[in-house]
Amino acid sequence: MAKDAKPAKVVLLSGGNPQIPKGDGDAPVQAYIAAMPGWKQEVGARLDALIVKAVPKVTKAVRWNSPFYGLDGQGWFVSFHVLTRYVKVTFFKGAELDPPPPGFTAKSGEARWIDLYEGEFDQAQLAKWMKQAAKLPGWKP
């Protein structure tokens, strides 16, 4: 980038979700977090740090405008996504977690999620879920 060039402005999609190009590694995930609007940016940074601490060998990527976390050869175990009033944290095999995260529908299959609203962040429970989820076979699209 030229010395005087400004970084391209990130487009926020419906609900404020950052539109970040597909990419592997930490850089696209950090670009996504940096583009998260308002208080959600802190939630994204805290989630990222918590996942890295709970699962030190985690791999990262951005897919479908969301950060994905997994282990090499095992698949993805968690992702998060910005919505208008909250950040949705989805565990792809969440039905197998103890206790399972509260979010699901009749069509969710094994996926379970938790919606994090401003001021809500149960670090201890999230860390337990991250550690459990990383031990399960992950989602391979």
Image: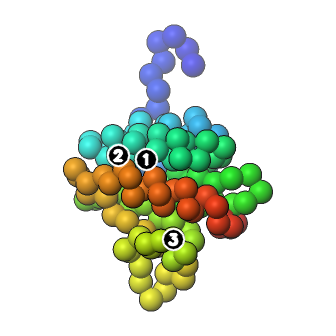
Q: Earlier in the sequence, mark 2 or mark 3?
A: 2
In the image, is residue 118 above or below residue 107? above
The quadrant of the rendering that contains the N terminus is top right
According to the picture, the residue beneath numbered tag 1 turns out to be: 47
Residue 13 in view:
no
Mark nearest the camera among 3 and 1 is: 3
| Residue at figure coordinates x 54%, y 42% from the top left | 52
Residue 8, percent across and down? Answer: 46, 32
| Residue at figure coordinates x 61%, y 58% from the top left | 134
Residue 113, percent across and down? Answer: 42, 68
Inspect the image, locate mark 1, and give the three-letter code of the amino acid beneath it: Leu
In the image, is residue 67 above or below residue 32? below
Q: Mark 1 packing: few (<14 Cα in 10 Å), some, or many (20+)?
A: many
| Residue at figure coordinates x 38%, y 74% from the top left | 103
Residue that lies at the very extreme toward the right in this rendered image = 73
Q: Quadrant of residue 35?
A: top left
According to the picture, the residue beneath numbered tag 2 turns out to be: 43
The quadrant of the rendering that contains the C terminus is bottom right
Mark 1 touches mark 2? (CB < 8 Å): yes
Q: Which mark is residue 97?
A: 3
Q: Nearer the viewer, residue 33 or 45?
A: 45
Secondary structure of the residue carrying tag 3 is loop
Inspect the image, locate mark 3, and give the three-letter code of the amino acid beneath it: Leu
Residue that lies at the very extreme toward the left in this rendered image = 119
Q: Earlier in the sequence, mark 3 or mark 1?
A: 1
Q: Mark 2 packing: few (<14 Cα in 10 Å), some, or many (20+)?
A: many
Residue 72, percent across and down? Answer: 74, 52
Q: Quadrant of residue 136?
A: bottom right
Inspect the image, locate mark 2, and give the three-letter code of the amino acid beneath it: Val
Residue 68 in view:
yes
